[in-house]
Image (tube, rainbow, N blue to C red):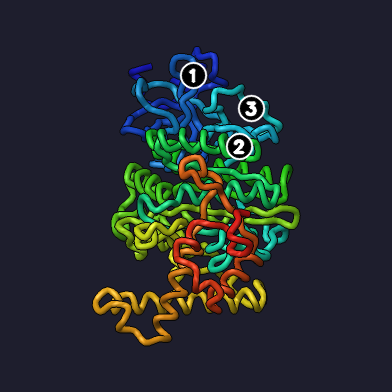
């Protein structure tokens, strides 16, 4: 077989492997890290799952490029250690598929639906392809009303659109993952929905901690976690988002009407695509990103759709390289979002958590016809007060508060209390902070902000507004 120059001599070969099925498709010609070139007896279609047998196990690849009439290039979805040239390659007969079942809730899985939590393998109700077209437009439903989270600054200034897409933008260490955990807690507690978490390029330590934190918070029974960890091949990190989204679609159609799809981190999905692009021999485009950046992001984002029977609301953490919002990867993701939540280092430096920038964050739901006149009016008044305070900060730093007029001092006095009021203790980190979590209804947030703007709490010290739930009734946690 090693002397074989054409595919004819192995066309009918059956490899003696217990997991191989049928004749070999071809043999490995070349191995370059996570990429293999294969000489084929027949060309498999693009995105076909093929595999190699090694030590009685399947090593799966996905076809990404036809090099000529007999050769294809495929991306590894396992480590390629131990593979050799001239090893037979077999055709699975289909694209990448995962097992789906209602019993997937409460589990931690890899991109093949295999358990990472030490539990028993899933008993599949059926199998679904992870590369699939979006829901037909005739069955899709548009974005609806707002989805309340109980988080004051989010519900007030940048509310989530039910069935929409939200991006959490921020650099390292500003609280993206903690905020995502609190959203998962809120969807279970407030909406009796389910969550699907896609860990795209998760650090193994962080993924392990997140899994245990979810168990400690009591939300794991209504949550599915799908991890493609940082040490996995770029093929896994590139496809893990689609695998998790396939589970979300199944749960939307068969289990729950309200599904929260969370991805941490969408930027690592783009990075994985960039790695693959170079390995596949494509010329890089702007700032070294893949030329297919926009279409790859769209392939994932356009699958996040609601139907007439159920909603998928997406929340995606997006790492911003060097805090540069003009980065092409950030721009490609931003184009698909309904809500943009900017996490600010300045807010984090002040100890304001969640570190949401109230002036830069925005939502397409901030419309009187959607949120109502009172909500719109209060949100605008809060933004105006905080914007004026930000304008005056430099003057205060140079000349002191005494240099301001009486009206400006009053604005600063109230804006500082508003800023601290928009901080909030979270349920999912209560064990670490020692502060009980708080969930605040939107009506209470509006009433408290109106009172703060009127000056009803001017006599209170700023610390009394910090890290609490609602103001009324002595500030008890909700």
Residue at horizontal 46 percent and vertical 41 percent from the top: 432
Query: Could you tell me residue 417's position as x and y percent?
Result: 47, 69
Residue 340 in view here: no
Q: Give the structural element (helix, strand or loop) at label 3.
A: loop
Residue at horizontal 45 percent and vertical 56 percent from the top: 353
Residue to which mark 1 is pinned? 57
Which comes sooner in the sequence, label 1 or label 2?
A: 1
Query: Could you tell me residue 335's position as x and y percent?
Result: 48, 65
Image quarter where the C terminus lies is bottom right
In this rendering, the answer to whether 274 lies above or below 359 is: above
Query: Could you tell me residue 202's position as x and y percent?
Result: 43, 40
Q: Residue furthest left?
A: 398
Q: Is residue 470 left or right of residue 252?
A: left
Q: Nearer the viewer, mark 3 or mark 1?
A: 3
Residue 179 in view here: yes
Residue at horizontal 73 percent and vertical 42 percent from the top: 255
In this rendering, the answer to whether 455 lies above or below 101 is: below
Residue to which mark 2 is pinned? 220
Residue to which mark 3 is pinned? 122
Toward which corner of the image does residue 348 lie, by quadrant?
bottom left
Residue at horizontal 51 percent and vertical 52 percent from the top: 425
Q: Give the structural element (helix, strand or loop) at label 1.
A: strand
Q: Give the structural element (helix, strand or loop) at label 2.
A: helix
Contact between labelled residues 2 and 1, with CB atoms less than 8 Å apart: no
Which comes sooner in the sequence, label 3 or label 1?
A: 1
Real-space Cα separation, disc 3 to disc 1, in angstroms: 19 Å
Q: Nearer the viewer, mark 1 or mark 2?
A: 2
Real-space Cα separation, disc 1 to disc 2, in angstroms: 31 Å
Query: Could you tell me residue 36's position as x and y percent?
Result: 37, 32
């Amino acid at each position: 077989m090693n002397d074989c120059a054409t595919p004819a001599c192995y066309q009918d070969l059956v490899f003696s492997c217990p997991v191989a099925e049928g004749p070999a498709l071809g043999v490995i010609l070349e191995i370059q890290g996570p990429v293999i070139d294969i000489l084929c007896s027949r060309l498999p279609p693009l995105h076909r799952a093929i595999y190699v047998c090694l030590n009685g196990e399947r090593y799966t690849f996905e076809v990404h490029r036809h090099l000529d009439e007999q050769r294809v290039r495929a991306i590894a979805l396992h480590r390629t250690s131990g593979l050799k040239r001239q090893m037979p390659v077999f055709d699975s007969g289909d694209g990448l598929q995962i097992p789906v079942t209602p019993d997937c809730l409460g589990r931690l899985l890899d991109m093949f639906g295999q358990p990472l939590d030490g539990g028993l393998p899933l008993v599949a109700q059926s199998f679904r392809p992870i590369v699939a077209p979006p829901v037909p437009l005739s069955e899709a439903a548009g974005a609806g009303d707002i989805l309340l989270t109980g988080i004051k600054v989010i519900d007030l200034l940048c509310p989530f659109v039910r069935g929409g897409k939200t991006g959490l933008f921020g650099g390292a260490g500003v609280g993206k993952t903690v905020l995502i955990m609190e959203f998962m807690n809120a969807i279970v507690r407030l909406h009796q929905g389910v969550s699907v978490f896609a860990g795209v390029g998760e650090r193994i330590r962080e993924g392990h901690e997140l899994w245990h934190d979810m168990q400690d918070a009591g939300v794991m029974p209504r949550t599915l976690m799908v991890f493609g960890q940082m040490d996995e091949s770029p093929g896994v990190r590139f496809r893990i988002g689609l695998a998790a989204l396939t589970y979300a679609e199944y749960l939307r159609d068969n289990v729950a009407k309200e599904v929260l799809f969370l991805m941490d981190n969408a930027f690592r999905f783009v990075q994985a695509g960039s790695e693959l692009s170079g390995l596949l021999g494509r010329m890089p485009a702007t700032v070294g990103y893949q030329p297919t950046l926009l279409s790859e992001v769209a392939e994932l984002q356009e699958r996040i759709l609601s139907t007439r029977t159920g909603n998928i609301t997406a929340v995606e953490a997006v790492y911003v390289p060097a805090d540069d919002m003009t980065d092409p990867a950030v721009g490609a993701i931003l184009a698909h979002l309904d809500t943009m939540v900017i996490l600010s280092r300045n807010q984090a430096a002040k100890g304001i958590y969640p570190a949401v920038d109230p002036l830069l964050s925005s939502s397409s739901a901030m419309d009187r016809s959607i949120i109502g006149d009172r909500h719109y009016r209060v949100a605008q008044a809060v933004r105006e007060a905080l914007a004026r305070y930000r304008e005056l900060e430099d003057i205060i730093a140079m000349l002191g508060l005494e240099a301001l007029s009486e009206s400006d001092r009053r604005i600063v006095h109230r804006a500082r209390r508003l800023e601290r009021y928009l901080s909030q203790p979270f349920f999912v980190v209560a064990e670490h902070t020692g502060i009980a979590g708080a969930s605040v209804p939107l009506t209470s947030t509006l009433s408290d902000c109106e009172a703060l703007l009127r000056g009803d709490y001017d006599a209170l010290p700023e610390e009394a507004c910090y890290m609490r739930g609602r103001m009324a009734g002595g500030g008890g946690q909700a």
